[in-house]
């Protein structure tokens, strides 16, 4: 794909049911980005019309596909996501049953969108517009980070997975969901949800943008959306909640640590913004951990405290005052690297 300027990138953390918090944040952001169009009586643009690349991990990958590949509004995504919460709540189901329930739910969503359930994630005939990818790991080597893409890249052979298979792979968090087998028989691999270190895919977003758009392409905005930190949560051990609790804590701690690292590296450049409810999502009552109303209320309170940051993000997104080359961003973790701001 030809090099582009002023790219807009978005990254969605994994987080299970708390992905609803991410959608509440995105709803506020999209309202701001479309405000001028609404004043002029124009149709609001979709998230896929604002962003060039969206990447996600776990349920963040599910959201990325819905927004970019399925071209859904945030409201539509939120409605479907709330229906999927019923799947994640079935703690008494076996991993195989959980995976089957998620598969059937996604098939229903595809049918409602007028799409075949075996629609491929990658469509070589549609390489323009917003692209997306999801992160998964291999069961045989949990330290791997595999990106399943909607676009071809020169560094890796194209994957033939369907949209539903990609979602099942990135959402296959262990031990709640069963591993997902993908690929032809002689190259079949078992995928599971992203391992620790890949729950916040911000580095993958930068790396994928580098492969997709080229090192000389410039980035005007990077949005990272987290699903909030649960703090101390008490879940009775007799309902299988201990495993879920451990996974959730690991995911959230991992995501926040990665976010702090990225902000330290290039937060001052002015193009990187991170939104995630760090305070307020904590609760000691297990009944609220998966309550959509509670999650939405905590996120709304958080957004009221983030007005200045949201304003700064919106202005930078629209005006693209500065841009940074992907070649510079790819050296994200080099301590001695100095970023070069390029006025647009």
Image (spheres, rainbow, N blue to C red):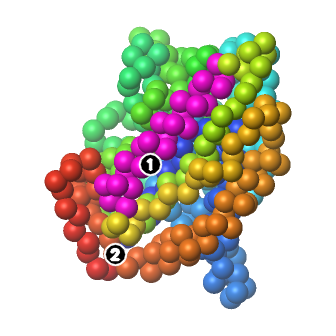
128 shown above or below 291:
below
Report the span colored magenta. Answer: 243-267
Which residue is painted at 66% across and 63% down in the image? Answer: 303
Q: Name the residue under label 2.
A: 322
State the image coordinates of residue 91 (x, y, percent, origin top left): 77, 20
Q: Is 301 displayed left or right of 207 in the figure? A: right
In depth, the one of 331 and 34 nearer the eye is: 331
1 shown above or below 58:
below
Point out the image quarter for the C terminus.
Answer: bottom left
State the image coordinates of residue 9 (x, y, percent, origin top left): 45, 58
The residue most toward the left is 336
Which residue is painted at 31% across and 55% down in the image? Answer: 265
Q: Is 69 displayed left or right of 318 in the figure? A: right
200 shown above or below 302:
above
Q: Earlier in the sequence, mark 1 or mark 2?
A: 1
In depth, the one of 237 and 45 nearer the eye is: 237
Tell me if label 1 and label 2 are in contact, CB under 8 Å: no
Q: Is 105 displayed left or right of 12 in the figure? A: right
Q: Name the residue under label 1.
A: 259
State the image coordinates of residue 26 (x, y, percent, origin top left): 63, 59
167 shown above or below 339:
above
Q: Where, by quadrant of the figure, is residue 216 drawn? A: bottom left
Which residue is painted at 39% across and 16% down in the image? Answer: 141
């Amino acid at each position: 794909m030809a090099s582009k300027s002023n790219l807009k990138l978005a990254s969605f953390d994994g987080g299970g049911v708390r992905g609803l918090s991410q959608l509440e944040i995105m709803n506020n952001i999209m309202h701001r980005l479309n405000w001028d169009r609404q004043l002029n009586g124009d149709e609001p643009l979709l998230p896929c019309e604002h962003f060039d690349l969206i990447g996600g991990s776990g349920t963040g990958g599910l959201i990325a596909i819905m927004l970019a590949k399925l071209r859904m509004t945030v409201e539509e995504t939120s409605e479907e996501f709330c229906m999927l919460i019923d799947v994640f709540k079935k703690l008494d189901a076996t991993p195989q049953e959980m995976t089957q329930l998620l598969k059937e739910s996604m098939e229903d969503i595809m049918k409602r969108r007028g799409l075949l359930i075996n629609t491929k994630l990658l469509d070589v005939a549609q390489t323009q517009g917003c692209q997306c990818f999801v992160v998964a790991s291999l069961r045989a080597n949990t330290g791997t980070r595999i990106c399943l893409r909607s676009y071809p890249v020169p560094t890796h052979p194209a994957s033939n997975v369907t949209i539903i298979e990609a979602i099942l792979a990135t959402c296959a968090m262990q031990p709640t969901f069963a591993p997902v087998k993908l690929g032809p028989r002689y190259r079949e691999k078992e995928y599971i949800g992203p391992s620790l270190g890949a729950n916040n895919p911000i580095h993958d977003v930068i790396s994928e943008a580098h492969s997709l758009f080229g090192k000389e392409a410039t980035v005007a905005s990077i949005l990272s959306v987290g699903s909030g930190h649960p703090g101390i949560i008490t879940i009775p051990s007799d309902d299988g909640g201990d495993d879920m609790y451990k996974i959730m804590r690991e995911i959230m701690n991992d995501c926040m640590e990665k976010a702090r690292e990225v902000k330290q590296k290039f937060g001052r450049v002015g193009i990187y913004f991170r939104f995630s409810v760090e305070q307020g999502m904590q609760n000691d009552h297990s009944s609220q951990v998966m309550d959509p109303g509670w999650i939405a209320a905590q996120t709304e309170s958080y957004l009221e405290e983030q007005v200045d940051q949201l304003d700064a993000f919106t202005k930078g997104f629209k005006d693209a005052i500065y841009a940074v080359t992907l070649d510079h961003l790819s050296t994200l973790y080099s301590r001695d690297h100095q970023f070069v701001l390029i006025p647009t």
